[in-house]
Image (cartoon, grey):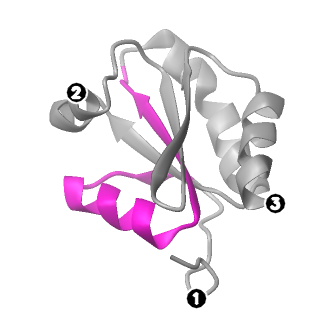
Amino acid sequence: MSSESQSIPAEPIQLGGEDDFENAVSTYDVVLTDFYADWCGPCRMMEPTIEAVAAETDAAVLKIDVDRFQGLASQYGIQGIPALLLFADGDLAERFVGVQQQDDLEGAIAEYTG
């Protein structure tokens, strides 16, 4: 599961299919998943933060539309959005619900990218 052979994208990856989720979590050492919806005001407020985290950290950022991927949202117990799940080495490491500060997300990511 080393990301050395796979460069970390500097911008969020839009989930195209459920297989892409498993591929991202297994390809990159640290993945921040952003469960969101286009109609969600707080999700739109988080957009610049999500883009900055993707650009400025060693984590891949994966955006998951809960309307399109309801099964995936249900699988991870997403009940409120925005919901951010942090995966490290393929395992769920941390969960954030609601609008988050960039510093808090970057600090959590730094614990796993270290």
Give the image location of residue 108, x and y in percent: 74, 39
Closer-to-camera residue (7/86)? 86
Closer-to-camera residue (89/69)? 89
The numbered mark, 3 or 1, whose residue comes first in the sequence reads 1
Above or below, 103 against 24 in this view is above
Report the amino acid beneath label 3: Gly
Q: Give the residue number, with chain letter if any, for mark 1.
A: 5
Q: CA distance from mark 2 to mark 1?
A: 32 Å
- Say whether residue 42 is magenta: no
Give the image location of residue 74, x and y in percent: 22, 27
- Say whether residue 32 is magenta: yes
Report the amino acid beneath label 2: Ser
Disc ID at residue 30 = none
Q: Which residues are magenta?
A: 12-38
Instruction: Choose top left, top right, bottom left or bottom right for residue 80.
Output: top left
Closer-to-camera residue (77/67)? 77
Above or below, 53 against 22 in this view is above
Looking at this view, name the residue that lies furthest to the bottom: 5
Q: Give the residue number, with chain letter if any, for mark 3.
A: 114
Instruction: Choose top left, top right, bottom left or bottom right for residue 25.
Output: bottom left
Residue drawn 59% across and 77% down? 3
Q: Give the residue number, with chain letter if any, for mark 2.
A: 74
Residue drawn 27% across and 30% down? 73
Above or below, 61 against 114 in this view is above
Q: CA distance from mark 3 to mark 2?
A: 31 Å
The numbered mark, 2 or 1, whose residue comes first in the sequence reads 1
Q: Secondary structure at mark 3?
A: loop
Report the amino acid beneath label 1: Ser
Contact, mark 2 vs mark 1 (Cβ under 8 Å): no
Looking at this view, name the residue that lies furthest to the left: 71
The numbered mark, 3 or 2, whose residue comes first in the sequence reads 2
